[in-house]
Amino acid sequence: MMNVFEAADTRLSCRAFLDKPVDQNIVRDLLARAARAASGGNLQPWHVYALTGAPLAEIKRQVAAYLADHDPHQEETEYPIYPKMLWEPYKSRREAHGVQLYGALGVGRGDAAGRLAQYKRNFAFFNAPVALFIAIDRKLGPGQWADLGGYIHALAFLARGYGLDTCPQESWARLHRIVRAFVAMPLEQMLFCAVAIGYGDRKHPANAFRSPRAPVAEFCRFLGFD
Ligand SMILES: Cc1cc2nc3c(=O)[nH]c(=O)nc-3n(C[C@H](O)[C@H](O)[C@H](O)COP(=O)(O)O)c2cc1C
């Protein structure tokens, strides 16, 4: 059984999944175990819609039809995914991420069509056989949004225990209207993101790079340590 360090070390945002189904009991188990995540006041503010099989195929079909004549980048989100303009160090980190991802896929900087095609892979869940939509009560605040991240990461690490990979996908927030109608999400909820789940194709170029991290000294000030 994989230990927690290995699970954390091997988690990545998987952008190519194998054509291999996931046992539904494993998905149910992951959803339940991830709810051990801490949340302020134990509010457990996550709402999850889990899709596989025919419903998953159908929402992908609906979205593909919509995106045939809509640019997903032009779709309005219900919350700002990023501030309008990023500043340092975030701006450089985001740019480096794009260079790394598109570089691994051989999509050139000026290749707008290639970039859009890769971005649109989000809306096929990168071929994952299971997809989650994660929503929050829109009256809740930043504290509870942070709790959603805790739930998603608990799930991502636990998934590694089953040899599964995941990809959190904020891009889906752009298609909130289609998602809301499809899963009958009540109006008081807001779509935060999707999470793709499946067995990753670890040899695929999209999964063959490791995203960098800033050294601890860059984001942590130590007080009272030797
Ligand atoms: C909330 C959240 C939303 C994300 N949305 C997307 C997305 O829509 N598409 C995508 O390809 N990656 C998405 N990512 C993945 C990030 O790009 C990734 O976590 C980051 O580059 C670090 O890489 P790693 O997860 O492989 O360690 C998202 C990550 C998080 C935490």
Image (cartoon, helix red, strand yellow):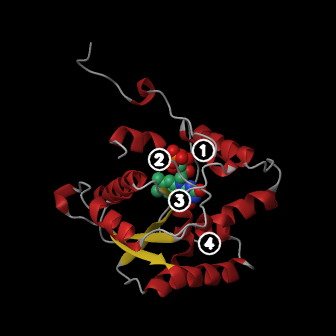
Q: Looking at the image, tell me whether mark 2 or mark 1 is earlier in sequence order.
A: 2
**Helix, strand, or loop for circle 1?**
helix
Q: Mark number for residue 94? A: 1
Q: Amino acid at mark 2?
A: Arg
Q: Looking at the image, tell me whether mark 4 or mark 2 is earlier in sequence order.
A: 2
Q: Mark number for residue 11? A: 2
Q: Position of residue 86 (x, y in %)?
A: 57, 46
The residue labelled by disc 4 is: 75
Question: Which class describes the residues within 10 Å of circle 3: few (<14), some (14-19), or many (20+)?
Answer: many
The quadrant where residue 123 appears: bottom right
The residue shown at (31%, 59%) is 34
Q: Mark number for residue 199? A: 3
Q: Is mark 3 within 8 Å of ligand 1?
A: no
**Helix, strand, or loop for circle 4?**
loop
Q: Using the numbered discs, state the Cα–Cα distance from disc 4 to disc 2 in whole angstroms.
A: 29 Å
Q: Is mark 2 within 8 Å of ligand 1?
A: yes
Q: Amino acid at mark 4?
A: Glu
Mark whose residue sits in front, 4 or 3 = 3
The residue shown at (34%, 63%) is 30
Q: Position of residue 198 (x, y in %)?
A: 51, 63
